[in-house]
Amino acid sequence: MSVQDDRPLLVAEGLTKHYGPHLGCADVSLDIHEGEVVAVVGESGSGKSTLLGLLSTQLLPSAGSVRYRMRDGEERDLFALGEAERRFLLRTDWGFVHQDARLGLRMGVSAGGNVGERLMATGWRHYGRIRAEAEQWLERVEIARDRIDDRPDTFSGGMRQRLQIAKNMVTRPRLIFMDEPTGGLDVSVQARLLDLIRSFVGDYGLAAVIVTHDLAVARLLSHRIVVMRHGRVIETGLTDQVLDDPREPYTQLLVASILQA
Amino acid sequence: MSLDREMIRLDAVTKTFVMHLRGGARLPVVSNVAFAVRGGECVVLGGPSGTGKSSILKMIYGNYRADGGRIDINGPTGWVDIARAVPRAVLTLRQSTIGYVSQFLRVIPRIGALDIVASSAREIGLDEPAARAKAASLLERLNVPERLWHLPPATFSGGEQQRINIARGFAAERPILLLDEPTASLDGANRAAVVELIEARKRAGAALLGIFHDEDVRDRVADRVIDVTKFAPEASAR
């Protein structure tokens, strides 16, 4: 883990979300530092996706705050940002990898167009340079250069996920949010994707929040783990510590339920 | 490094597992663990299986939590109590100061044996060519056939995986090295190679703490043996 600044990149405090009478998540506080990968684990309905939505400002909290240290070093309250500022942050300094690639990609636009779009949003104008940069990133995520003009709806599930990653990485984000990035993929396809994510996190000092129900994914990728149940964080700590020496009854049940291959 | 300087210091360390899936049964493992390890020595934890030797190593690495007591580690910026340190501080210490070798390799999909070992050498700042050279020399010393170096170890035999794990553990030279039965089930030649690696780390001033069931290896590497049965919970708690 490379640490450029000792202050956290993102600080969430008391995040709470109600959906009408239903609780999405309650009183979650969390720090994320540069280069740090945090896995949020729990079963369906545990509130982990709600938490991801709040941290990434896709959802508005019922209570609580998220502060973020911008590239200029200034810490800002994310829910007080103007819409233009927030969108700019999402398109440059942040990435988002969805389980459903259709949420993260424009399926009717070429692979190169999907990647180039993020560059254009940050002011790139020169067509040749945008195309060259997009080609490089496709190659880095192991998509053949000659697929650059093909649309993602002609891609396999694994390729779509890798294209999402290329699209996000092209602006060199500092923080990337991932919602079940390996969900629904074949095991061999998963391994390739996990390997890519692991190397990008290492090579670029990316911070990441990864929501997953797969504890093996959490073990492979994350430094820290947050275990959620019924909308609350019930246990948190170093990933190998929580998985090898789980303390809470529910965490012990989760760990004991893993199938050993 | 730090010849004769205390590097690890345990005081009143206690560990009890609470098994919630078995009705909250409490399983006391150790209590009142107290000892220190200095640079340049190899201390061996002795005693029968099930007396908590491995749990002690895991607590020092921050892999298991201690329920009480202090585990002070002499890190680059002074002493840190790993029993109370935040996750980031534990990771920083693992990066800078504490290495750990177990007999089991946790395989990473798609990464070849040489790369696994080299990436460990890179963690302490070796550049890519130096890290690969170091990895190759370790794999050679541990008799891992060269035709395996570029294959991911998932399909290797248990013994081959174990030797890759040992190579990985020794590739990053840190001031503290924890050894959890690294020589279990190795043949004579490979046991001897591990003994040599341990002796080299000792000469370099590293503090070594290990578990060795093999008496021959233990006699050759140990400067002291600590009898873990004296930390049995019933011996001190009642």
Image (cartoon, helix red, strand yellow):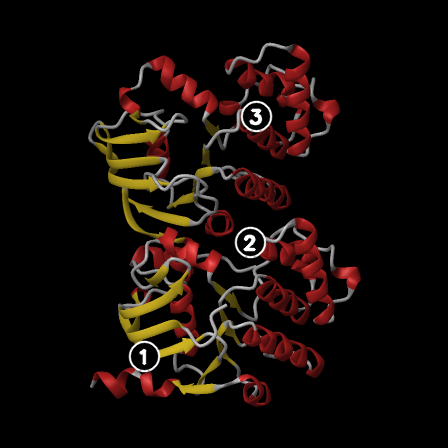
Q: Name the residue under label 1.
A: B34
The three-letter code of the residue at mark 2 reads: Glu
Judged left or right of residue A81, residue B119 is right
Task: Measure the C-alpha gap from mark 1 to mark 2.
Answer: 31 Å
Judged left or right of residue B117, residue B208 is left
> Could you tell which of marks 1 and 2 lies nearer the N-terminus?
1
**How many C-alpha atoms fall within 10 Å of the one at disc 3: few (<14), some, or many (≥20)?**
many
Task: Measure the C-alpha gap from mark 3 to mark 2.
Answer: 26 Å
The three-letter code of the residue at mark 3 reads: Val
Q: Nearer the viewer, mark 1 or mark 3?
A: 1
Q: Which mark is residue B123?
A: 2
Judged left or right of residue A61, residue A260 is right
**How many C-alpha atoms fall within 10 Å of the one at disc 2: few (<14), some, or many (≥20)?**
some
Q: Where is residue B82 in the image (x, y as percent from the top left)?
A: 34, 63
Q: Do labels 1 and 2 share a chain?
A: yes
- Give the image quarter of residue B24: bottom left
Instruction: Label 2, secondary structure: give it.
Output: helix
Q: Mark 3 points at which residue?
A: A170
**How many C-alpha atoms fall within 10 Å of the one at disc 1: few (<14), some, or many (≥20)?**
some
Q: Position of residue B54 (x, y in %)?
A: 44, 75
Q: Do labels 3 and 2 share a chain?
A: no
Q: Which chain carries label 3?
A: A
Residue A76 drawn above or below residue B58 = above
